[in-house]
Amino acid sequence: MKKRAERFKLYEYGIFAAVTAVTVIVCVCLGSVSVPVSETVSAIAGAVRGLFTGVAPPETTNASVIVAVRLPRVLAVALTGASLSLCGAAVQGLLRNPLADASNLGVSSGAAVGAVLSIAFGFSIPGLFQAGTMMSAMVFAFLSLVLILGLSYRLDYSLSTNTIILIGLIYTMFASSVTSLVVTFAGSKVQSIVFWMMGSLSGAKYRDVVVLAVSLAVFGAVIFRYARELNAFAIGEDNARNVGVNVERVKYAVLIAVSALVGVCVSIGGSIGFVGLVMPHAARMIVGPNHRRLLPAVTFSGAVFLMLADLVARTVLSPRELPIGVVTSFVGAFGFVLIFYQTRKGR
């Protein structure tokens, strides 16, 4: 059997990047009104050229739809998918549990509580659009993580993965109850909150793309920084310590980065499930379990998956649009059962 390289090769980055770029173009082209590929590429190229030259390209109806509506949405979806998938792979590697994810550890639910509170009661930061919701989601995601780790430590000083997952699941149910309670008193904002909770990036703007890109670059870099340590966790925490890994520092650094990145994604796109749970499994089938290869692969594949899910969400019942979280839950549930079955069959 041919041994896989330890790191991603340049041509592998090229292949994954090319597939992602093609998916972006396809998703921008297709919608309630389909636009030819040549016109789509021309509109995007004209917009990019205009940024550097200061000369606005000729405006047409299709070009306006592509540049102002579809492109920012597709880019935001891609960055959200990449972020959630990367977080899922990091958490699964850290806790050595293929069922672990930010969504079932309580981090996503905590971020959702913060975002819903901000939306329902109008918390905002003057001069910064959506900053109140984003800050609230990040703070609640981090506080949720602190609470989960604190309770886990009180119950099990070794912070075993099973204890963390169990406390996370209990906290997820508690956070869902709090969210439902807030919705009860949300008044006229109930409809927007409920639609947001199902996951949607239909109103994404370029400012959201910038925030997501910066967050992925900053917090994603922290996760990539510990790829080698995540490999060491695969042989157990005690063995990781024996090879020189500072287990506590790695745990806290990765979990804090995950909570911050999930908080940003939840504040912008709502609750989008199964992406971080299923995509790491799919990526492992392609590149193997080595995190130095897995993390880049899962970042690209997560972006592609969520873009295709968003394409289905806005075209399958056109002109009506489905929340993207509904599509990912359907696909993710069946996909996870298939992956689990194949894994058990292989064993």
Image (tube, grey):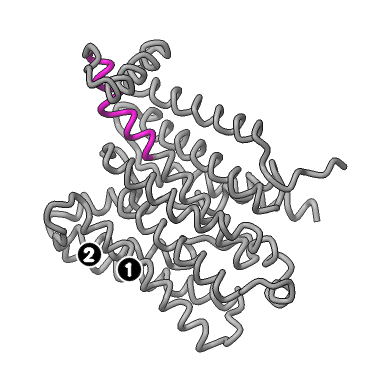
Q: Residue furthest right?
A: 1
The quarter of the image holding the C terminus is bottom right
Of the residues under marks 1 and 2, which one precedes in the sequence?
2
Label 1, residues with CA under 10 Å away: few <14, some 14-19, many ≥20: many
Closest to the observer, 60 or 243: 243
The answer to which image quadrant residue 34 occupies is top left
Residue 107 at what x, y percent from top left? 42, 65
Q: Residue 24 or 4: which is nearer the viewer?
A: 4
Callout 2 amino acid: Leu
The residue that mark 1 highlights is 140
**Which secondary structure type mostly characterizes the magenta part of the structure?**
helix
- Residue 152 screen position, x and y as percent: 51, 82
Q: Quadrant of the N terminus?
A: top right
Residue at 69% from the left image edge and 46% from the top image edge? 7
Q: For the magenta stretch, what is the residue range? A: 60-76
Q: Nearer the viewer, mark 1 or mark 2?
A: 1
Q: In the figure, residue 172 lies in which quadrant? A: bottom left
Instruction: Give the structural element (helix, strand or loop) at label 1.
Output: helix
Q: Which numbered marker is on residue 117?
A: 2
C-beta proximity under 8 Å, tags 1 and 2: yes
Q: Amino acid at mark 1?
A: Phe
